[in-house]
Amino acid sequence: MKDNTILVSVEVEKSEDGYLAKVPGIQGAFAEGDTIEEAIFNCIDVAKMIFEYRKSRNENLGFNEISLTKNSRLAFSMPVGI
């Protein structure tokens, strides 16, 4: 099975109501959450919708796509509250 994947950076900052996450360079790709994790996952959902919309219109996604196979590995850092 082969999936196309886009690597994006997500910025997170504290807001009055929790946390705000955004993908720099993608207009409208931001979301809030009560926790850092929730803000990130909400933001990724918004970014996916934007990418799907752009793809449906044959527009440039603005990021490099990579292909992942069942043997591919992807590492990322994520804050974990303790």
Image (cartoon, grey):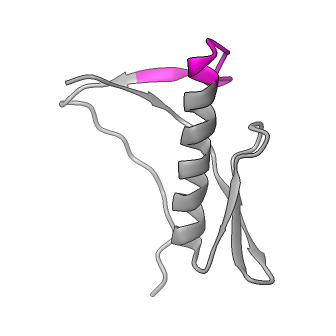
Residue drawn at (77%, 37%), measured in percent from left and top? 25
x%, y% of residue 56? 57, 19
80 or 65: nearer the eye? 65
Residue drawn at (57%, 20%), measured in percent from left and top? 55
Helix, strand or loop: magenta stretch: loop
User: In this picture, is 40 found above or below 74?
Assistant: below
Residue drawn at (57%, 78%), measured in percent from left and top? 35
The magenta segment is: 54-66
x%, y% of residue 72? 26, 31
User: In this picture, is 38 found above or below 47?
Assistant: below
Reply yes or no: does residue 49 show up in magenta. no
- Left or right of 59, for residue 49: left
The quadrant in which the C terminus is found is bottom left
- Examine the image and state in which quarter residue 59 appears: top right
- Total marks shown come to 0
User: In this picture, is 41 found above or below 32?
Assistant: above
The quadrant in which the N terminus is found is top left
79 or 37: nearer the eye? 37
- Left or right of 26, for residue 33: left
- Examine the image and state in which quarter residue 73 appears: top left
Q: Give the residue at the far bottom of this rendering.
A: 82
Reply yes or no: does residue 65 show up in magenta. yes
25 or 55: nearer the eye? 55
Residue drawn at (63%, 45%), measured in percent from left and top? 9
